[in-house]
Structures are given as structure tokens and as C-alpha cells.
């Protein structure tokens, strides 16, 4: 623990918490930001229908909902022609896009993805091996797309789907470089920004990506909303994700007499999650006005403190895909040799009031591979079959990190 102290704690969101509880599980669900809670509380007395009423309450709620869409779109750098579609979460967003793919689309992913970016894609998708470093990811994608260009029928679409930051290791993927490769071969690219957006600015225009998905519950707005943002042509041409009220411009007396709406409404049938959208927009606005460079510097200091402390514990082994110095956000997965990960997590919670995640983190292929590689790298034969994950957020302090390290060092 010889790293320099982290900068003073800036918390532009006013993250809520329970005194005495140490939450190191932000990667699963982040705590609620005061900005989100306040936005919801302010709107609650006015709560009414959206897009479906002429009364003052309904008009106010409709305006709040559409302003939230604009705020979220601005936060992620949405361009003219992009749709900002509110969903339930990242998984819902990716499934929506999977339903909207043109016939014959080939999807290219990496085996290190979260299940949400592995399971929704159609048969015939290409799953590339986990690369050893970011440059290897770029080379592997270039080779795969060149092969598809030779072998696939001309004109069939290709979508590359990749994480922005791994939910297992926190390692940041070379999104801009992957986007350049994809576009050079005529492919589109989706970024799963669920783990990246809470830690770093994400801009569709700057990264030149076609689609982006994220979850509010990982972005300090745990009110059941996510978004899919991106190019409108595939989304407008696809059948609605849900059939129902709000997704239509006309319904006639016969079953086939339906004209579907275009734009976000096409895929937002039913009463929308107004409060979730407003909460997410409030967090986006607060973060947009914050000093993101200072927040990043502080997180990196805490992350360095955590990783150095873990490395100093003789029975703790960190899991990683890329070299140890690769860029990453505040997520670290590790194992304690000779100890069951679920048992360690339970002891941390019961004896120290520290919350971490244990398991395979909804990324089973990657987590199992990393556990196997960790055993080979260290020569340890007593590593458990599942891992532990500590993930940092705006409310994390040096004392929280030190408490975890002390608890691990003194496990009975």
C-alpha cells in the first residue's frame, strides 16, 4: 500500500449509501445517485401518461421524457439520424438490435464478451478467440472481416459487437481502432458500454461507432432503464421489438391493417418507464458537468492501490486478459488460492460488511479461460473454479480499499 494517496473525493452525483457498508460491487449494480433520486422525487407528484394525454400532467411528463431522451443522446454523442431508444437495460438493448438485424447479417464477436453480447445473436455468428492484447484484437478482427469479405455473399451485412470495458477484468478495449477496421470492410459496430460509460466519457461520433448500449443501473440510476443509441435505418426497417400501443401510426379493422411508427416510438410500445428515463438523464447531466479527468485520475489511484495490495498477498491471483499495464477501469477479478470464492465473499460480508461479487460474472467462457490461464501462469493447482470481483465507483474511498485488503490478509 505504498501508492500515493488518491485525490480528494469528488462526487458530483452525491452517491447514496448505507453507513458502515462497504460496496465494492458497482459493476453489478451501482448505488443510486442523489441526482437521480431528486429528479424522480421532483417528478412524482406530476406522474401521468406519456404521449397519451392532453392534460397538464401528461404534457409535463411527455416533455420530461423527451428531454431525457435528448439529454442521454447528448451524453453519448448521438448524431443526426441516430435513434435513442429507451429499453430496460443493456441486455434488452442488445436483444432489440439483434431482432432488428437485416436478413443474412453475420455478427462477429469475441469470446470474452458478457453473455448479453454472446447469446442474442443469430446462428452463423463468428466468435473470435480472446486476444492476448488490444493490438491482437484489432488484427484478429481485420483478418476475420477480410475472410468474410472473400467467402460471404456480396452485399450481406456484417455487425461487429464488442465490449467497451470487460466486466470481468475492467480492461478497456480498443474501440476506435476496431471501428476503423469494421468500417474499412463495410461492417457496422456495436459497443456494449455498460461498464465503460460509468467510468469514462463515451462518444459515438468521436469513436465512430454505429450503435451503443448501456444500462442505467450501472450508471447510478437504478430505475430500470437502459438505452440503445445508433443508426436509424436498420431500426426503422425492422419489425417492432414489441407490438402494442405507441408503436403504431395506424391500426385498421383487419389484423393486417397496421402501419408502424418510425423512430424510437417503433420499439417503445406500451407505457414507457418515465421515471427511469428521467433518472438516467439526471445522472448523464451531472456527469456531463463534472470534471471527468479528475474522476478518472482518482479512480486510477484507487485501482492502483487495490491491485498493488492484492499482488502483495501471497495466495491472491489477479485474473487478466491483456498485459498487466493495459488500460482498465475500476474492476478487478481475482481468486484466493485454496479458498472457495463463494465462502470468501460470504465471510467478507458477514465479518467485515464488505460486498463483492463471486462467480463467473455472466461471462462464463472468459472467466473459465482466465481461471485456467491463472493456474498455468502461477503453477498453482489449488485455485477455485470461480472468482471474486471488486469493482470501484464514485463512492469508493481509500479506506474501503484498505478494508478489503486487510480482510483478505486476515482470512481465518
Image (spheres, grey):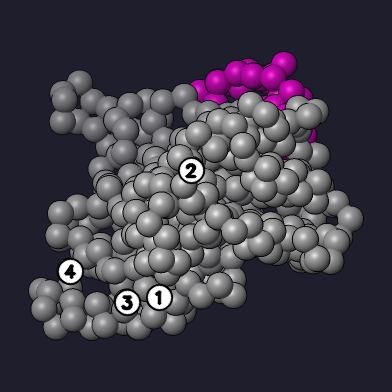
For the N terminus, the quadrant is bottom right
**Residue hosting label 2:** 339
Earlier along the polypeptide chain: callout 1 or callout 2?
Answer: 1
Earlier along the polypeptide chain: callout 4 or callout 2?
Answer: 4
Return the mark for residue 30.
Answer: none
**Residue hosting label 3:** 141
Using the rendered view, name the quadrant where residue 218 is placed: top right
Tell me if mark 2 has few (under 14), some (14-19) or many (20+) residues whose alpha carbon lies within 10 angstroms of its own.
some
Residue under the image location 67 percent in, 29 percent down: 351
Q: Do residues under tags 3 and 2 come within 8 Å of each other at their CB atoms?
A: no
Looking at the rendered image, the disc whose residue lies closer to the viewer, 3 or 4, is 3
Which is more toward the observer, 203 or 251? 203
Which is more toward the observer, 202 or 116? 116
Q: Residue furthest right?
A: 8
Earlier along the polypeptide chain: callout 1 or callout 3?
Answer: 1
In the image, the segment drawn in magenta is 32-61
Earlier along the polypeptide chain: callout 1 or callout 4?
Answer: 1
**Residue hosting label 4:** 156
Q: CA distance from mark 1 to mark 2?
A: 28 Å
Q: Do residues under tags 1 and 3 come within 8 Å of each other at their CB atoms?
A: no
Q: Is residue 359 left or right of residue 409?
A: left
Q: CA distance from mark 1 to mark 4?
A: 30 Å
| Majority secondary structure of magenta residues | helix
Q: Is residue 229 left or right of residue 147?
A: right
Q: Is residue 367 above or below residue 265?
A: below
**Residue hosting label 1:** 132
Residue under the image location 46 percent in, 47 percent down: 338
Looking at the rendered image, the disc whose residue lies closer to the viewer, 1 or 3, is 1
Q: Residue furthest front?
A: 412
Tell me if mark 3 has few (under 14), some (14-19) or many (20+) residues whose alpha carbon lies within 10 angstroms of its own.
many
Callout 3 secondary element: helix
Amino acid at each position: 500500500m505504498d501508492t500515493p494517496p488518491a485525490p480528494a473525493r469528488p462526487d458530483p452525483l452525491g452517491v447514496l449509501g448505507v453507513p458502515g457498508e462497504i460496496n465494492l460491487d458497482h459493476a453489478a449494480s451501482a448505488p443510486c445517485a442523489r441526482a437521480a433520486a431528486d429528479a424522480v422525487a421532483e417528478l412524482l407528484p406530476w406522474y401521468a401518461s406519456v404521449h397519451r394525454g392532453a392534460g397538464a400532467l401528461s404534457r409535463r411528463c411527455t416533455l420530461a421524457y423527451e428531454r431525457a431522451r435528448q439529454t442521454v443522446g447528448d451524453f453519448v454523442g448521438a448524431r443526426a439520424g441516430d435513434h435513442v431508444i429507451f429499453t430496460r437495460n443493456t441486455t434488452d438493448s442488445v436483444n432489440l438490435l439483434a431482432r432488428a438485424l437485416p436478413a443474412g447479417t453475420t455478427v462477429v464477436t469475441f469470446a470474452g464478451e458478457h453473455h448479453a453480447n454472446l447469446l442474442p445473436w443469430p446462428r452463423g455468428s463468428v466468435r473470435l478467440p480472446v486476444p492476448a492484447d488490444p493490438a491482437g484484437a484489432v488484427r484478429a478482427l481485420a483478418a476475420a472481416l477480410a475472410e468474410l469479405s472473400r467467402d460471404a455473399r456480396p452485399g450481406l451485412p456484417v455487425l461487429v459487437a464488442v465490449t467497451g470495458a470487460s466486466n470481468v477484468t475492467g480492461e478497456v478495449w480498443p474501440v476506435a481502432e476496431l471501428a476503423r477496421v469494421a468500417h474499412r470492410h463495410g461492417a457496422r459496430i456495436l459497443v456494449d458500454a455498460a461498464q465503460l460509460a460509468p467510468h469514462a466519457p463515451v462518444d459515438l461520433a468521436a469513436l465512430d461507432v454505429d450503435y451503443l448500449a448501456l444500462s442505467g443501473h450501472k450508471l447510478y440510476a437504478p430505475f430500470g432503464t437502459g438505452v440503445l443509441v445508433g443508426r436509424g435505418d436498420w431500426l426503422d426497417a425492422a419489425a417492432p421489438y414489441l407490438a402494442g400501443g405507441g408503436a403504431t401510426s395506424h391500426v385498421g379493422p383487419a389484423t393486417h391493417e397496421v402501419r408502424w411508427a418510425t423512430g424510437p416510438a417503433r420499439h417503445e410500445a406500451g407505457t414507457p418507464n418515465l421515471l427511469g428515463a428521467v433518472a438516467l438523464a439526471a445522472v448523464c447531466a451531472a456527469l456531463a458537468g463534472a470534471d471527468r479527468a479528475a474522476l478518472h485520475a482518482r479512480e486510477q489511484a484507487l485501482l492502483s492501490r487495490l491491485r498493488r495490495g492484492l499482488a502483495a498477498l501471497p495466495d491472491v491471483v489477479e485474473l487478466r486478459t491483456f498485459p498487466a499495464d493495459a488500460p482498465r477501469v475500476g474492476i478487478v477479478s481475482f481468486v484466493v488460492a485454496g479458498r472457495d470464492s463463494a465462502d470468501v465473499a460470504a465471510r467478507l460480508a458477514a465479518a467485515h460488511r464488505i460486498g463483492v461479487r463471486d462467480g463467473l460474472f455472466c461471462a462464463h467462457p472468459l472467466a473459465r479461460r482466465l481461471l485456467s490461464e491463472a493456474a498455468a501462469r502461477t503453477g498453482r493447482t489449488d485455485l477455485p473454479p470461480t472468482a471474486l470481483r471488486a469493482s470501484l465507483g464514485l463512492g469508493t474511498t481509500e479506506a474501503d480499499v484498505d478494508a478489503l485488503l486487510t480482510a483478505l490478509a486476515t482470512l481465518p
